Image (tube, rainbow, N blue to C red):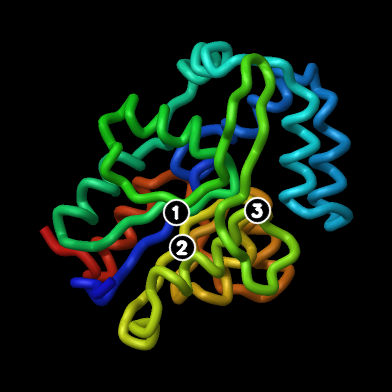
Amino acid sequence: MTLKSDLIVFSDFDGTFTARDIGNRIYTHFSGGRNRPLVEDWKKGLISSRECLTRESELITATADDIKAFLNQFELSAGALETYKELTNHGIPFYILSDGLDFYIEYILRKYHLEQIPYCANRAIFDGNRLRIEFPYQNDSCPRCGSCKGVRIKEIVGAQREAVDVVFIGDGLSDICALPQSDSIFARGDLLTYCRNHHFPAIEYSDFFDILTWFKETGKITD
């Protein structure tokens, strides 16, 4: 792939591009909260994302239609749609990188007529009321992630890395592998705390309107 811009933007999905963490709420709702100890073990680094997601999926009993009905309550983060449109109008590539599931990402993107946004995520396979997760992406030496965002950035940007400014937007611990691959980092929540504790110069944001303002004030996009 040859990039047509000297700037490329990558965004996490759950709790970043969307206002709430959809994946976590699916597992919590359909497991009756039995997933919470697994999430805590993952946050502590005791289990990998792949193990956490696999074991969470084994706790729930729900059909694809059950989960679709549950998804109707979720919305994009404030300013996400406007920021995406401004970036694409200026020829700036925008990708979603997720350690969640393709099933609900596709559903939400269709809801907002954003099917054209490229994304990388883990794969949901439904068999009646059982959910199985596949991990189609290789992660090099990363033992932590289902789909490592740092590896995905390296794959997408490729040999043009030195000529391209990488902007990453995130909110959680599944985003930390993207940090060394990024030139500008927007962070909130657990990711912001991690950045401050590990000396990554992150920009705190409340919503995507803050990010859009930064793009305009820094001259990276102009009206």
Q: Residues within 10 Å of mark 3 (few under 14, many from 20)?
A: many
Q: Nearer the viewer, residue 76 or 187?
A: 76
- How many dots with numbers? 3
Q: Which mark is residue 146?
A: 3
Label 1, label 2: how far apart the Cα atoms are: 6 Å
* Residue depicted at x 66% and y 27%: 131
Q: Quadrant of residue 174?
A: bottom right
Q: Is residue 167 left or right of residue 21?
A: left
Secondary structure at numbered mark 3: loop
Secondary structure at numbered mark 1: strand
Say if mark 3 contacts mark 1, CB within 8 Å: no
Figure check: 190 above or below 75: below
Q: In the image, residue 26 lies at what x, y percent? A: 64, 25
Q: Amino acid at mark 1?
A: Ser
Label 2, label 3: how far apart the Cα atoms are: 18 Å
Q: Amino acid at mark 2?
A: Phe
Q: What residue is shown with label 1?
A: 11
Q: Amino acid at mark 3?
A: Gly
Say if mark 1 contacts mark 2, CB within 8 Å: yes
Q: In the image, residue 25 lies at what x, y percent? A: 65, 27
Figure check: 3 above or below 49: below
Q: What residue is shown with label 2?
A: 168
